[in-house]
Amino acid sequence: MAAQDELNQLERVFLRLGHAETDEQLQHIISKFLPPVLLKLSSIQEGVRKKVMELLVHLNKRIKSRPKIQLPVETLLVQYQDPAAASFVTNFTIIYIKMGYPRLDVEEQCELAPTLLTAMEGKPQPQQDSLMHLLIPTLFSMKYPSEPSKVASPFILVEKPKTVHLLLDFMLDVLMMPYGFVLNEPQSRPNPASPQSSAGNGSAGGVGIPQPPPGMSFYGAKRIIGETPWTPEQLEQCKLGIVKFIKAEQVPEVEAVVHLVIASSDTRHSVATAADLELKSKQSIIDWNNPLIINKIYKVYLGDIPLKTKEGAALKPELKREPVSTRVKLKILPHLLRSRLAADTFPANIQVVYDGLFGANTNNKLRSLSLQFVHHICLVCPDNNKPLGLMLLNGLTKLINEYKEEPKLLCVAYSAVGKLSSRMPQLFSKDIALVQQFFEAMCKDDPEIRLSIQEALSLMVGAYTSLQGALLNLMEALVAAYMEKPEVQVRQVAMKFASTVFAPDHIPSRYLILLAAGDPREEVHGEAQRVLRAFPVKTTEKEGSKPMPSFPEMVSYIQEKASERMKTPAKYTVGTSILPFNPSAFGEIILYLRMCLAHSAGAMPTSQSLADMQDNSPAIASYVRNLLSGNPNSLLVPKGGDSNPVQLYMELLQQLLSAIGGVPVMYCLLEVVSVYPQKLAAKFTDKIDWIKGLMNTNKEDMRELAAQLYAVVVSTMSGNELNTAVQNLVKITKDNHSPETQHGAILALGYLVGRYLAKKKVSADIQNQEQPMITRSLPENEELIRSATNTIGSFLDSPSPLLTVAACTALGEISRNGALLIPNEGTGFTKLHLVESLLSRIPSGKENNKMKERAIQTLGFFPVGDGEFPHQKKLLQGLMDSVEAKQLELQFTVGEAITSAAIGTSSVASRDVWTCTEEEYTPPAEVKVNDVVPWVLNMILNKYIISQNPHVRQASCIWLLSLVKKLSQHKEIKSHLKEIQTAFISILSDPDELSQDVASKGLGMVYELGNEQDQQELVSTLVETLMTGKRAKHGVSEDTEVFQGGSLGKTPDGQSLSTYKELCALASDLNQPDLVYKFMNLANHHAMWNSRKGAAFGFNMIAAKAGEQLTPYLSQLVPRLYRYQFDPNLGIRQAMTSIWDALVTDKKSVDRYLKEILQDIISNLTNNMWRVRESSCLALNDLIRGRQLDDIIDQLPEIWETLFRVRDDIKESVRKAADLTLKSLSKVCVRMCEPSSAAAQRTVAVLLPCLLEKGIMSNVSEVRALSIQTLVKISKSAGARLKPHAPRLIPALLESLTVLEPQVLNYLSLRATEQEKTAMDGARLSAAKSSPMMETINMCLQHLDASVLGQLVPRLCDLLKGAVGLGTKGACASVIVSLTVQCPQDLTPYSGKLMSALVNGLNDRSSVVQKSFAFALGHVVRTAKDSSVEKLLTKLGTWYLEKEEPIYKSSCALTVHAIGHYSPDVLKNHAEQALPLAFLGMHEAPNEEQGENGDSTLWTEVWQDNVPGSFGGIRLYMQELIAITQKALQSQSWKMKAQGAAAMASIAKQQTGSLVAPHLGMVLSALLQGLAGRIWTGKEELLKAIGSVVSACSGDLKKSVPGQPNIIEVIDLVLKECHKENLRYKIAALKCAADVLQATQEDRFQELVGILIPLINKNSPTSAHTRKSKEDDDDDLDEKEKELQMESLLCAFESLGKAWPKSPATQGQYRLQLCQLMCERLKLSTWRVQVGVLQSMKAYFQGLLLLDKDHTDSVELSEILTKTCDAITFPLENKSYSSVRTEALNIVELLIRKIDECHQWGSLTPDSRNQLINSLTTMESDSRPELGEKATELRKRLQNLS
């Protein structure tokens, strides 16, 4: 039976479908019946299912031909999601969803889009694909919220991870899909289930499976194409929709990054640009090291690579993804380059590299990016991933070997190999073939590639440093081969290999480098020289290797190679000489051999300056002697035998010297001969002429060295040869043709005589007569020497400066070794003349510096060789008086000369400089002592040190330092230590830096010389002088101020005593005053000490020693020194930095003494000297940057507070320093508050009170700003750790909103108009809410709970009550709102307090604050108790009714509106209180300022939102409404009365038809009560209400009901009101009376006429005319008054019509009078009055009893009609106003009808009839056709009657 019913139902549906004629009908039927019909498919009856199928087939045909017909998609979707539905039903349902969804409007599609996603859950894959196919095109049109966090998102996908995964996968395929792609299905598909079918998988994905697009699988392509493929334009929109969807953050960013990357590579510009922009905007957020992102990118990039694994085999061919296209790869690779993880993901990284370099579809751009990726991998990958390294290396070498098209790519490839070698050297260390390959490539490839290979090889060098054995030999051969290639880069790299791969003592490699030093190209020989001359101080990696080869081995190797080369074309020809090496290489070989010699001798090898090299000579002398003593006859060994290395060295020197020359080579030869002349000079006896030749060269230095060599060689010969040589030289000097020859000869004479005298002195000393020849010919020799001396002396006055210098040098050399054999004084060339001559040259402007230097040296030597020198003091006096400005270097020379001259024969200057050091030298015993040190010291201390001339003081300080240094053991110096110290102290205050520095060094040296007692005295004197600034007790002239009063430590330019005072203070603080000397030694910063003369004092050694002695005091020193390094005084800063560098060598010292340093800095931040404050700030800034401060967290508040104070310092530089430090401190503290930090909780707890109390509330704007910035950052990084501090933090931040606001805004706000003020306050509050403080507060609020609310709420309440600032108040309200959302349950106990505080603030002067508080109350009531809400609403009601100020009324409206809007449930629960108030509020008269958007609008919204329609609402709350309106009517405020009246009227009007007892009585009584009393604005509303109530309920009023007024009472009261004088009110009263009388049919016409007739007469034309004539000159009768009078007149006539009674008696009394009145007015009035009169006349005739059959009186009727017809012709013929003609025509029609009905045509006189006919005839041609037609009809009726 049931089945039959179902079939019948289906038949009826069929029938309906058949009857549907229009699309609308068909659509209606489908919408109604399609879902239930589909459900019938689950029927168990076969017949029913068949019938359904028939019906669906019919339906499909009709639907498909009509594309506009809509299907019930929403219902179908609901049905589709039904879990109970049979699969058969869902399968058919989705067919119709697919059919209907695209037909919907875009808006409807967007609405249903989320449902499509929901429907996908748990459905079969094909159906999910279909739904996504429907969804994707909709995404383009979807509207997403601009702030997803605040507004609910259309797609809620958080709880649907599977759906998200499906959707993203589908979207990826859509984005991959090429435009216009067609999938060619195969003719016969194999069975995908059979495992054999996938066995022959090719790149196309399988046998018979067509090739899908790149990046997609066959299945993916097929599902995207779907049943109806998208056009290219539609596909573009789909892709744009997907980008938009991702941009709206509908899915997690991590999941969607790949999609954006793919989209950015789209071939259509719109899609690519949109995706690119989105990627750029998210670039900072995307973590490219996230494994999710990187793995997904790799999967897309590489596709599903068929791996030989179970997973690889299990993948069906149609599901296998192809790799993406080259275009996409080019977009993906730059992103992989950003990721460290991508570079570290093995093997995917190498697959990408190989694909990019050797893939089938690659191109140059992709290769280039792949190579960049290789670089990236080399930087990131771990150095132990050997497979990766090998594959990379193989790939790169393959590319280099095979790819020759693009040179730039090869460059990058080579560079990558280099980087790989530095990352994984172990891959390369055995592969020398690769090096050879690269060298070969360098020889053959283009220059641009060559540079890259050079770079790669340079990086590869490091991989070969540990080569040994055969491989090392192989490398040696390789380097040697390429060292001679023509390409400069090849040679350069070969040189680098030679210098790096081999140990520094590896002789063959050094030899190769030496050859490279002769390279013509600067880049090769420059690098070679750098390598050779740099002495390797640290031991190299090579075990057991020395810094340099040993001298004998190196010499023999060079000799061997030289011999070999002489037999090959490699030899070098210069003129007639043949050299084994080119000159520059040979020169470098010689210097290197000299360095090896020095190193082997135990000295420091150097080749920079000859003077430095000479310092090593004594050590070399000892070594050479040892070498030679091993083989005494070595010099006689014939050539080719085993030669001594020294001999080989000399041969090489001679060889180069003969061919080329060169000063360094000449020096090396001179040195090696001079260190052991006894043996080596003899070698040159037969080469004297060759040496003489060298003396004649054109180089001055060369001649000087050759002259010395000549002297050394000749001096070893026998006496006769010596005499001959001297005579020859004297002769040569006389030859004026060649100054060079003369120069050489003069120098040779000097050196020869000097060596002779030295020998004589030595022989005399040791009483050993080894050389009888010299002794025998002594008188003769003396004569010869005298002659030579005179000859030399004659050249002192030579015009040639060259010869003058030579003569001076020669005389100095003679006088150094013995007495000058010339007279002491007298005429001619005497000692006195010589001294005076030389002294005169020192200050002379004509002489060059070299001459002055030599003159000074020579003067110093006179008393050294001559113990009887008579002019010693004159000479010294002359030297000391010769000071000139700006001759600093010279004064060091003068100092040496004074020292030598003062001590005379005991001076170390007389030693043999080649073989004896200063320390080893002891003066001969039998020599006359000519020591004048006491006199010199006395002169310096008492005359020069105290000179007025600063240059003299500076010079004398240098002399004194020289005396103390050189004569440290001299008894005179030791006995005058105090005086010397005093002298040095006096120089400390000189403005010149060098003077100060020299003095400080001197003080240190003086201190070291004293014994313990001396040292104590010296220290106390120094400390007292420095610290008090007292003058030294030394006799100083009156003019000289050594210490200017009050200047100590105050000048910031570093040119005062402040540096030394600080050093002294530092020492005193350590209770070790003597340390001041150590400090002075360490505070070495003048460049002079780095020069040769400065270095001679050896202060570097002293400083090192001082540093060791100070180590015990480090803990006290480090804090002070650390701060001093930042002193603004440059001098102090440099001095202290020098001390710091010397003392604090351990980098961890600062960490070790961190607390001490910090304590010192903090205590000095508020020092009374600005310099100290500034340096403390800068030191603190340096100390805290980048350092973990977990140990000193407790000191942070003190640091912050102190810095806040310093930020307001009086000195700008201190303020800037404090600002810098505060910013650094802020960064450090924020970092410490991050969750990852261990001490985050403690840091937050310590910092917040300080920042809140001292920072935000500071008077200094910068401090406030920084505090707030720090708080905001801390709140961001601290997160939940803020919770315990929220009760302090939130109120403090809220208060700061006011404190930080510019005060000028308050002033402007007070001066502005109300409208301006509201706008301004709104902007201020908006600014406060978007401020950083509010941002911080919002972060705190996220972590609040019940545990902290107890403390927070009272503080918020205090703020609400006591705050003065607009920002604070508004923000407080905002915080409360957030709390109600964040923790509503926890807030319940405190809601009452909050409401109370908010209510108090509702009456704020600012409307913006008022709105904020109301808004907050609207939220708080949700968490409050019912009793609290009741109290609130009661209070608001009282305010509204009793307070007259607008502010109270608006606050009530805003609050109730907010409650209704944000807590509608609460309002509904208290509707009886709230809604009547809202109803009353609705009727508030709009304020002129507020306009339409006043409070009434808010009340209306509340009312309308909470009642079921206005009518029902009033009915529901009738009693409450009447109660509140009565209260309003009884209010003292007239305005409120009017409002009550309006509300009452509204009730009456709304309920007119349905008011019954008892409500009728209540309403009417209330209205009538309101009528009592005087008139007030709005009282008219009561009359209108009474009128409407009585009109509607007259029937009920006639019944007698207790408590309900009867009609008579109502009429009496209303008529009473009609007597009121106020015209406007009178009009309302009359209208009301007329309505009441009309409704009740009561006869009170007599009373009414008494009121109306005077009113009409008052406005009659005659009276108006009279009044006008009286007031001709008075134009003040304005339009409003005229309008009011017009209204009164119209009202009077309307009332007469409405109140016209049915009473015969009354009509009899007034009918003629009334007719007369109306007829008069018709003739003489304006059109409006005419219309009013005509309407009244119509009512009059309708009620006129004479026109009834029962009350006929033809005479009176005739009179009335005659008057009427006479008057009505006027309006009938009125051409201007059709309304007048229409009303008149209506009356004529009424009269004809009425007369006809009562058959009283006789009463209408013929005249009257004719008048009417004439007027109607005129009207027939009326402009309005309907009037014309009517007039014609009426005329015909009248004519017919006649």
Image: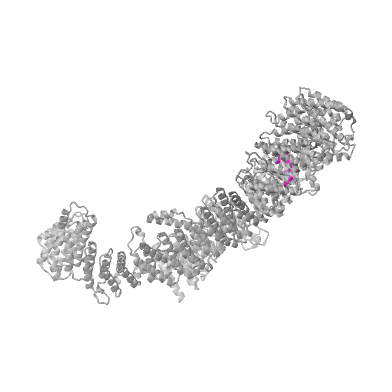
Q: Quadrant of the N terminus?
A: bottom left
Residue 941 shows up from this direction: yes
Q: Is residue 177 left or right of residue 1517?
A: right
1164 is higher (above) or lower (below) than 1603: above
Q: Quadrant of the C terminus?
A: bottom left
Q: Closest to the observer: 918 or 1512?
A: 918
Where's residue 1469, x and y in %? Answer: 41, 71
Where's residue 799, x and y in %? Answer: 72, 24
1043 is higher (above) or lower (below) than 1432: above
Q: Is residue 1094 magenta?
A: yes
Q: Main secondary structure of the magenta part?
A: helix
Q: Which residues are magenta?
A: 1089-1103
Q: Is residue 405 left or right of residue 1406?
A: right
Where's residue 1818, x and y in %? Answer: 16, 55
Q: Closest to the observer: 253 or 135?
A: 253
* Coloring basis for residues: one colour
Q: Is residue 1298 magenta?
A: no
Q: Closest to the observer: 646 or 76?
A: 646
Which quadrant of the structure image shows residue 591? Answer: top right
Where's residue 768, x and y in %? Answer: 89, 35
Residue 1148 shows up from this direction: no
184 is higher (above) or lower (below) than 910: below
Q: Is residue 646 left or right of residue 389?
A: right
